[in-house]
């Protein structure tokens, strides 16, 4: 007999992870799958970071670490915030967690009560919605379309705020669209938030180092709302350290203390060796980040040019991260005689089956007319993947 909690039954399976799992299963059967589904740099962790981890093992970093993270790591994060983002967070205002996802849920569980409304800007990263559900909160979705470069307006934010609004989830550069808000666009949204006391913003800045056009702006850098901003970041994307599982927040002290309290009952301090590696990453010269950024820029231009040549796809050029989100509504309702494409998930599964290319349907991101494609792979694989996609889509009538 199974008896699952209502909490678990209310959750969806992460579609990015599910598609990645399907890809691995097909690859294990010998099928030549090109995976463009997972948000993971295809680079290896830089050697200087790996050497720091090896040294940490030799130096016997094998005991329980402090719940919020080692003091020197939190001081390095504090300095990073100050130098890179113009944010003043003391070490006591920083909590190191097991990846950005862990940092996000810590904050949501710390300040969202059942029934509180949480505004999510769509297209959104898949876990935002379900993390709000875990906390008993009510997701309130603001939709942005390809025609507006997947950005919401200040007027949309104003219209969505009610007396029950507790938190706004903000993400720039964006997963899944790759769009980047300008300073002017962000300031206008920040001015709306300023008017509503008791509304907080969690700014997910995990892709800050992967920006091709313009500059990265931290929401907390606007002084008039800085006391209501929680900044989330980590080492996964910028340093090719996804498997090391290190994320962190900078937050008002009372929120940091709440997250520390919560984390103390869930995971306690996160992996000691990974923390030492993260410290080395933050103290590096940034050369590895520059190399990755150049590669991602080249790949962005490559895949966008290729996708623009595919009939029916509408593409907007991403300014950051390593995703592109074409509008695929042209193919909804079409069929190859065997499979009918009723939604974006159908199209993603069709491409996996007929083209052996793994993507992710936009439904999971709050963008049902789109498909998310990660271009964090080699140029040759991108060329071959789009060739396969183009051939498979031609069969749909």
Image (cartoon, rainbow, N blue to C red):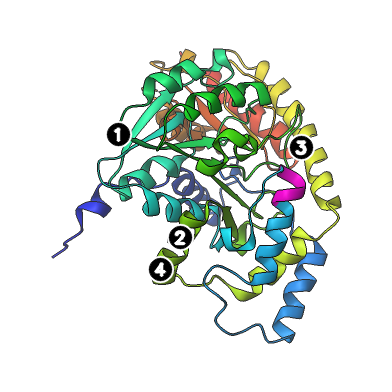
| Residue 248 rendering spot, x and y as whole percentages | 58, 56
What residue did someone put label 2 on? 259
Q: Secondary structure at mark 3?
A: helix
**Mark toward the viewer: 4 or 1:** 1
Residue shown at 50% from the left, 19% from the top: 154
- Label 4 and label 1: CA atoms lie apart by 28 Å
Range drawn in magenta: 81-85
For marks 1 and 2 on the same chain, the one whose residue lies earlier in the sequence: 1
For the C terminus, which image quadrant? top left
- Relative to 100, residue 1 above or below: below
Q: Categorize mark 4 by other alpha carbons within 10 Å: few (<14), some (14-19), many (20+).
A: few
Query: Which callout, 2 or 4, points to the residue nearer the camera?
Result: 2
Drawn side of residue 250 relative to residue 3, left or right: right
Ranked by sequence position, the earlier of labels 1 and 3 is: 1
Task: Tell me where residue 218 appears, x and y as whole percent.
Answer: 64, 38
Residue 164, numbered circle: 1
């Amino acid at each position: 007999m199974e008896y699952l909690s209502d909490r678990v039954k209310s959750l969806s399976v992460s579609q990015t992870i599910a598609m990645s799992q399907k890809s691995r299963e097909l690859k294990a059967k010998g099928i030549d799958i090109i995976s463009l589904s997972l948000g993971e740099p295809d680079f290896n962790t830089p050697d200087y970071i790996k050497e720091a981890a090896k040294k940490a093992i030799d130096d016997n970093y094998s005991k329980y670490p402090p719940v919020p993270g080692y003091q020197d790591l939190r001081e390095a994060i504090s300095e990073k915030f100050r130098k890179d983002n113009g944010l003043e967070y003391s070490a006591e205002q920083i909590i190191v967690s097991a990846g950005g996802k862990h940092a996000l849920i810590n904050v949501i569980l710390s300040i969202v009560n059942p029934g509180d409304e949480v505004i999510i800007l769509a297209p959104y990263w898949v876990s935002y919605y379900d993390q709000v559900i875990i906390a008993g909160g009510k997701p309130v979705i603001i939709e942005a379309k390809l025609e507006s470069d997947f950005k919401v307006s200040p007027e949309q934010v104003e219209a969505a705020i009610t007396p029950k609004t507790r938190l706004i989830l903000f993400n720039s550069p964006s997963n899944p669209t790759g769009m980047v808000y300008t300073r002017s666009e962000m300031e206008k949204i920040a001015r709306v938030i300023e008017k509503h006391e008791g509304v907080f913003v969690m700014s997910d800045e995990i892709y800050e180092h992967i920006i091709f056009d313009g500059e990265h702006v931290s929401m907390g850098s606007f002084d008039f709302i800085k006391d209501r901003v929680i900044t989330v970041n980590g080492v996964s994307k910028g340093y090719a350290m996804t498997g090391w599982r290190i994320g962190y927040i900078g937050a008002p002290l009372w929120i940091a203390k709440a997250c520390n309290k919560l984390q103390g009952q869930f995971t306690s301090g996160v992996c000691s060796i990974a923390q030492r590696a993260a410290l080395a990453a933050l103290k590096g010269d940034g050369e590895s980040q520059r190399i990755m950024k150049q590669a991602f820029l080249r790949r962005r231009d490559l895949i966008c040019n290729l996708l623009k040549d595919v009939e029916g796809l509408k593409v907007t050029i991403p300014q950051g991260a390593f995703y592109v989100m074409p509008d695929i509504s042209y193919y909804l309702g079409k069929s190859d005689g065997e499979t009918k494409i009723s939604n974006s998930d159908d199209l993603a599964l069709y491409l996996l089956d007929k083209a052996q290319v793994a993507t992710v349907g936009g439904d999971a991101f709050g963008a049902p007319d789109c498909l998310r494609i990660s271009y964090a792979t080699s140029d040759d694989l991108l060329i071959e993947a789009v060739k396969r996609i183009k051939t498979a889509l031609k069969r749909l009538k």
